[in-house]
Image: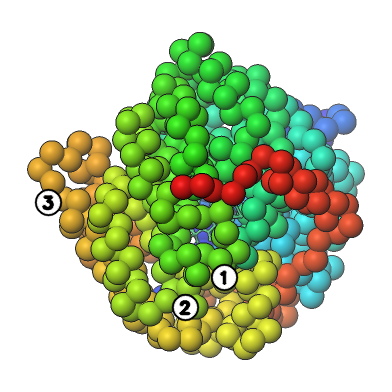
Amino acid sequence: MAQLRVVLIKPSKYSVDGSVERFKKGYMPNATLWHIASLTPGRVGKAAIEVITVDEYVWQDLSYLRWLHHDPDVITLLALVGVQSHQFHRALDLAAYARHHGVRHCVIGGPHPMTCDTTSLQGRGVSFALAEAELIWQEILEDAVAGELQPVYGAGRRWADELPNIVINPPSQADLARYGAPVLGLYPVRGCPYRCNFCSVIKISGRQVRNPDIESTLESLRRAKHAGVKIIKFVSDNFNKFPQVRELLRAMIEENIDLPFYCQCDTQIAKDPELVELLGRARCYEMFVGVESFNRKTLKAAGKHHNHPKSYAEIVRLCNIAGIRPHFSNIIGFPEDDEEEIRHHVDVLKTLRPRVVSFYILTPIPGTEQYDDFLATGMIAEKNLDRFDGSCYTWSHPKLPRKQLEDLLYHSYVNYYGFLLKDKNLPDDDLRFATFCRYTAGLRRHPMAGGYDRLKIDSMTDYSALRQQAYDIDYAPLPASLRLSVHDDELNRRADWRIKVHSAPATI
Ligand code: B12
Ligand code: SF4
């Protein structure tokens, strides 16, 4: 009887110095790995399926590459999952490595191939998945067993109208031990009705909010608890636009699920004190909110019309009452920003005092409207090949050179957390996190990079010959955004209707 070995790898990325980014401990298990592992059936036809999961960021040796060598006893399918734009080169290289070592079935899926044109790389022995796994994974598995993958899966339709009721099987204790804490990422709802022009979430998951039923999420939580998971991260982008959120939270309280969890909300949560209170009762310990900027003009230019800086203080207040750490996420380097504006931003944050903040330098993400605009106006260029950090393009800020933006990023972290650390009554968890952020940023490393303690084992030069051989390129070409299909456009239009009905303009 045939056996199919499915090797799921979440690829890392190349750092600026060319090394493969690896950590001694990861921040949290990658949610995509466990999501797709749980979507994989025990068998396809007569073939039994064995699933292997690898989060490359936390693998401290190269032993996993053995699964990328031909094994005559099994059919191997290598799936590079959750591939973001900055991980795309690494994904291409791992597929080239596997092809070189006799693995015939390789597929790359996730945000980058879903939102960017991969045509020039197609038909060279590596397949691309352009749609949600729920729509095409079964077909890929069947084709692997039948002997031949198609060059492309899911062209013409990125999103399912309805999601299956998938239950996530948690990582083993050995897998959980690779991370700073036993955390699991769950995705109980996806999509966001807004149109922020810098955000690729609406291109990856769409603007129509969709979810599996509540019972499947509850069952994922039960299994996680049973497996020793201590913290849940709901990686859904917009928990307060989840129509059944109250139902889920009440069920969690009633059943005493009792797992502390993190979630993400948009700033309109300021108008929903009752939901914040319910979140707190269900054991939400941290709420991530994309505040981005305090400048309303900047927010409008970014298409983030629903953010009203005057309402930010209310979010902090509501969270503090509910026992939730407000986490304000900030973007520095919007085209309108200059140094004074960014320094002023940190000063305003200090007056609001959210217990957690994160800063990101604006990076136009391929697939988004902002990327297309910047490309059209010449702000994005093919990368200088003497510098490499996983992406294959650079963009120039109209006012701030890259080095100055990076200085300001680390300065913002050090300055804000230095300010918090002056408080002698900081709760233990906040103290630990603030110390970590200030220390990491002091070393000019991004605290949200995905792990702790860097390890260097291998580098992009170890793989470049294979990349040349497989695709005849030194680097992936400058990405171009993929247009939405008629079907996906139609699904988004339904979101337009929803947003009008459910989201009145902010009054705060
Ligand atoms: C959680 C998260 C993080 C966590 C990651 C933790 C971890 N260990 O995974 C943290 C906080 C560390 C993080 C950091 C960053 N992140 Co982040 N993050 C997310 C978030 C909110 C959820 C991702 C997730 O888990 N999704 C759940 C899984 C199940 O969904 P999925 O991966 O999309 O998979 C589905 C499909 O893509 C498809 N699919 C995926 N793989 C495959 C494979 C095959 C074969 C098939 C058929 C289908 C398929 O099917 C799946 C199920 O439908 C997304 C936003 C979003 N909603 O996508 C941003 C997002 C992925 N992050 C993003 C970015 C830019 C970053 C940072 C670079 C930010 C920064 N400047 O520092 C860093 C990079 C760090 C790193 N090492 O990767 C961008 C990526 C953009 C892009 N197109 O490349 C996103 C989309 C956010 C955005 N606003 O645009 N992030
Ligand atoms: S509100 Fe957040 S998830 Fe929604 S489009 Fe804007 S940035 Fe993206």
Helix, strand or loop at mark 3: loop
Is residue 105 visible in the rendered image? The answer is no
Sequence-wise, the earlier of marks 2 and 3 is 2
Q: Are marks 2 and 3 in contact (CB under 8 Å)?
A: no
> Relative to residue 320, is residue 188 drawn left or right?
right
Q: Nearer the viewer, residue 198 or 151?
A: 198
Q: Amino acid at mark 2?
A: Glu
Q: Name which residue lies at 84% across and 68% down.
A: 123
Q: Which quadrant does the N terminus fall into?
A: top right
Q: CA distance from mark 3 to mark 1?
A: 36 Å
Is ligand 2 less than 8 Å from the beta carbon at label 1?
no
Q: Are marks 2 and 1 in contact (CB under 8 Å)?
A: yes
Spot occupied by residue 201 in the image (x, y as percentages of width and height): 63, 54
The residue singled out by tag 3 in the image is 422
Q: Amino acid at mark 1?
A: Ala
> Relative to residue 252, is residue 9 drawn left or right?
right
The residue singled out by tag 2 in the image is 336
The residue singled out by tag 1 in the image is 301
Q: Are marks 3 and 1 in contact (CB under 8 Å)?
A: no
Q: CA distance from mark 2 to mark 3?
A: 32 Å
Helix, strand or loop at mark 1: helix
Spot occupied by residue 283 in the image (x, y as percentages of width and height): 41, 25
Q: Quadrant of residue 365?
A: bottom right
Is residue 216 visible in the rendered image? The answer is yes
Sequence-wise, the earlier of marks 2 and 1 is 1
Label 3 packing within 10 angstroms: few (<14), some (14-19), many (20+): few
Q: Nearer the viewer, residue 289 or 61?
A: 289
Q: Name which residue lies at 80% across and 66% down.
A: 483
Helix, strand or loop at mark 2: loop
